[in-house]
Amino acid sequence: MTKQSEVGRGVKFERIRRITGYLVGTLDRFNNAKRAEVEDRVKHQTGKETK
């Protein structure tokens, strides 16, 4: 059995976000207004904070 701190280590994943009704991985195709919306959003933290 692995230690709790090793669970998920080395697993690659892609971040998916829902912005203005679209599921996106990157912002490269967004115009300035949509990018501004992303920057203005309140960021929420779940779980332990990492430093």
Image: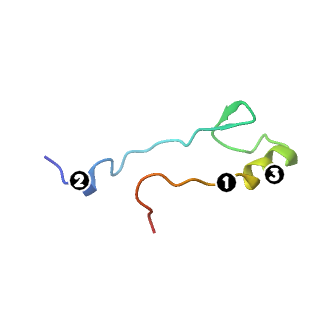
Q: Secondary structure at mark 2?
A: helix
Q: Earlier in the sequence, mark 2 or mark 1?
A: 2
Q: Which mark is residue 4?
A: 2
Q: Is residue 48 above or below residue 27?
A: below
Residue type, label 1: Val
Residue at the outermost left position: 1
Residue at image point 38% right, 45% down: 11
Residue type, label 2: Gln
**Looking at this view, is 40 or 35 the one in front?**
40
Q: Quadrant of residue 49?
A: bottom left
Crowding at label 1, few (<14), some or many (≥20) Cα neighbours within 10 Å?
few
Residues marked 2 and 1 touching at CB (< 8 Å): no
Q: Relative to residue 18, is residue 13 drawn left or right? A: left
Viewer-nearest of discs 1 and 3: 1
Q: Relative to residue 29, is residue 15 drawn left or right? A: left
Residue at image point 78% right, 48% down: 37
Q: Earlier in the sequence, mark 2 or mark 3?
A: 2
Residue at image point 19% right, 54% down: 3
**Looking at this view, is 33 or 12 the one in front?**
33
Residues marked 2 and 3 touching at CB (< 8 Å): no
Q: Which residue is mark 1?
A: 42
Q: Which mark is residue 36?
A: 3
